[in-house]
Amino acid sequence: MSTADHTPRTDRRNGRDRDGRGETRITADPALPTIVITREFAAPPAHVFRAHTDPALVVQWLGPRRLTMRIDRYDARTGGSYRYTHTADDGTAYGFHGVFHEVRPHTRIVHTLGYDGSPDNVSLETTVFDDLGDRRTRVTTTSLMQSVRARDAKLATGMRDGIRDGHERLDELLARDGDNTADRPGTTAQAAADSRTPADEHRRVAHAFTGLVRAVPPDAWDNPAPCDGWTARDVVRHLVEWFPDFLKAGAGVDLPKGPSADDDPVAAWTVHSDGVQALLDQPDTAHRTLTNPHIGELPLDRAVDQFYTADVFLHTWDLARATGQDETLDPRKCAELLEGMLPMDEILRSSGQFGPRTNVPDDADVQTRLLAFIGRTP
């Protein structure tokens, strides 16, 4: 994905641009109405792709540093749409919007890009993620515009600086926020978690779960799930039923109620998840408390993060396994949860929340170790 910086700049070099960290190439074919943007990143395709599709990550890098980004919606799935605004210090706003025509996990994104300031000039953006091996990814974005004249006008806005700045920010994000942190010896996963707000973390985790929910074939909702006696439908049912009662009893919060998981599991989850996100996005939520006889009194947003968002993350694997979808979990989050659970092994086991640990090799990856800890068979 690319976003032009639409404020005037003096840098108007043609051909290829390079920055001091990596190498961003911006090429304009003189005969075709295209701009091709290429850069390599020191992270595997799954993590670079996630940074392009997870709104909680996109907001941290897309566009120049001097502009503040606000995302109104960002539904990065085939058929989804997005809208966001970049705002300068003087209040000038630059709005962008479009539709995702194809989102192919870890390999390809195709979407339109419209700018509010030039409504007649909509481009088609195709971004390809090439695995270079050795934990490196080449990202190539081809912007196809309606005419060479429209292409040249876009180049004249100073977009090169905005793209370069965004790529530097993405480099920084991948360095601190990918599985580099989750599995690197001598680092602490909790240190990475400390910089994320409960609202951002829920947005990220719920986004991944929502993608799975929407991709479940209609005839797969009654497939058996890894939890004994559960189906895929029961995974959604569990999340939309236990948490509203927990919130109501502990904080007096009523979440919006959608249809039952029996009637429409997709709508049941969507209404519920949107309600939780709206709660976490409210400025006063961080100053409210939740009281429970088993956990005592906690800040409301922390309670949601610790008990509910973590539950959604763990059941993401269950739903993926039940419906034959991609079972890959964020290794950083896996490491964070495992690090917090290990000291509580006996307490968690005696509570009945998890079954007996399953045996896996000592050198298993962090996702496998987490799943084994909570009693799943990876």
Image (cartoon, rainbow, N blue to C red):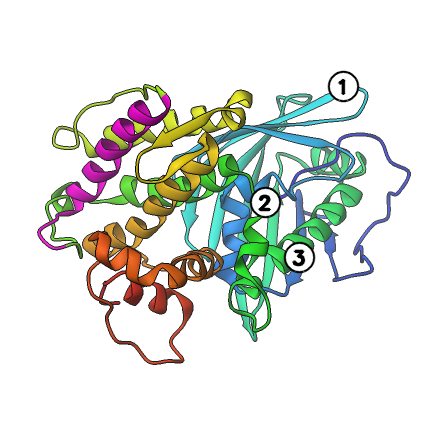
Which of the two marks, 3 or 1, is nearer to us in this view?
Answer: 1
Residue in the foreground of this view, choosing between 121 and 307: 307
Where is residue 88 shown, x and y percent of the image?
77, 26
Secondary element at image label 3? strand
* Mark 3: few/some/many CA within 10 Å (<14, 14-19, 20+): some
Query: Residue at (70%, 49%) from the top-left corner?
Result: 169
Secondary element at image label 2? loop
Q: Is residue 36 left or right of residue 108?
A: right
- The residue labelled by disc 2 is 1
Residue in the foreground of this view, choosing between 127 and 282: 282
Q: Earlier in the sequence, mark 2 or mark 1?
A: 2
* Mark 1: few/some/many CA within 10 Å (<14, 14-19, 20+): few
- The residue labelled by disc 1 is 91
Q: Earlier in the sequence, mark 3 or mark 1?
A: 3
95 versus 213 height, above or below: above
The amino acid type, in three-letter code, at marker 3 is: Thr
Q: Is residue 231 magenta?
A: yes
Secondary element at image label 1? loop
Where is residue 373 shown, x and y percent of the image?
30, 65
Residue furthest to the right in view is 10
* Residue 355 seen in the current view: yes
- The residue labelled by disc 3 is 38
Q: Main secondary structure of the magenta part?
A: helix
Question: Which range is magenta?
Answer: 228-251
